[in-house]
Image (cartoon, rainbow, N blue to C red):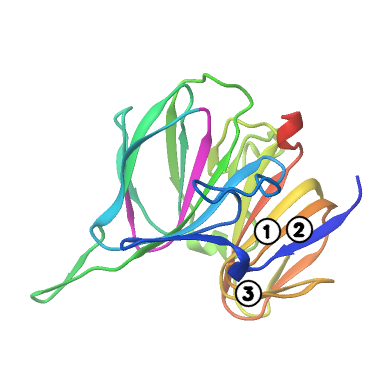
Amino acid sequence: MTATVDIRRAEDRAQTKISWLDSKHSFSFGSHYEPENTHHGLLLVNNDDIVAPAAGFDTHPHRDMEIVTWVLRGSLVHQDSTGHSGVIYPGLAQRMSAGRGILHSEKNDSWTLTGSEEHSEPVHFVQMWVVPDESGLAPGYQQCEIDDELLRGGLVTIASGMREYRDQSAIAIANKSAALHGARLSAGHSVELPSAPYLHLFVARGEVTLEGAGALHEGDAVRFTGSGGQRVTATTAAEILLWEMHANLSAA
């Protein structure tokens, strides 16, 4: 496999912008179809979403997809047809397995009271979809809080189906060839990328530099093939999400 480093800039993403939603898509999504941009490795969706207060996605179906949600700011209320419900907030890893079919909703119901005034804020989150190893699995749900100090100590495995990370991962996904890592980096701190046939690096917040490639800004992404070992160094306080994948969609 030829090693490649493909930088995708934030401003080049397709965007869905309506009254209550500002969603930026790293891959083809909904009406934004690009036949040459449907996935990388096993990752089909990397949506960078901001949802206005008291708004969100009404109940809708999914099937045969592992959906991982990572909140950057605010809080997101989840409800699904298997009876699971809860509030997702920064540092809480959440996975929904759509399996043979599930209905769910996601709403921004976050609000706080200060004295006699009510304040609400948008919720900002990244939602990522990977295919499961098998179709028709039972729907499922899992969430787990990751300690802030751990996230600030380097790459932490947020979600994985890989045997290598079984004892380290906060949540599990039904794909034995994929793992999601994350890190919160202070300016000057760095992490080394693992080696894998496919990597997808997303700068969720802040700015970093990628060894050998230069500056990456908030919303930028990098698709690696046959690569790894590069260092990512924060130039401001930053948060990164990294998919490590040992198969691609056509071979999954």
Name which quarter of the figure residue 41 lies in: top right
Find disc 3 in the rendering and name its residue: 217
Classify residue 18 as left or right of residue 8: left
- Residue 108 appears anywhere in the view: no
Residue at numbered disc 2: 193
Q: Choose mark 1 or mark 2, whichever is in front.
A: 1
Quadrant of the frame with the N terminus = top right
The secondary element bearing badge 2 is classed as loop
Mark sitting on residue 201: 1
In depth, the one of 19 and 88 nearer the eye is: 19
First reached walking from the N terminus: tag 1 or tag 2: 2
Disc 1, SS: strand
Main structural element of the magenta stretch: helix, strand or loop?
Answer: strand
Amino acid under label 2?
A: Leu
**Magenta residues?**
64-77
Instruction: Let me know if residue 68 is in the magenta part.
Output: yes
For residue 217, above or below residue 167: below
Amino acid type at circle 3 is His
Whole-number angstrom distance, CA of label 2 to CA of label 3 = 18 Å
Numbered badge on residue 148: none
Please report contact status of discs 1 and 2: CB closer than 8 Å, yes or no.
yes
Badge 1: residue crowd in 10 Å (few <14, some 14–19, many ≥20):
many
Work out which residue is located at the far left of the displayed protein and give it: 116
At 57% from the left and 75% from the top, the residue drawn is: 206
Q: Image point 47% across, 28% down: which residue?
A: 63
Does the segment drawn in magenta span residue 91? no
- Relative to 225, 84 lies left or right: left
At 68% across and 58% down in the image, what residue appears? Answer: 201
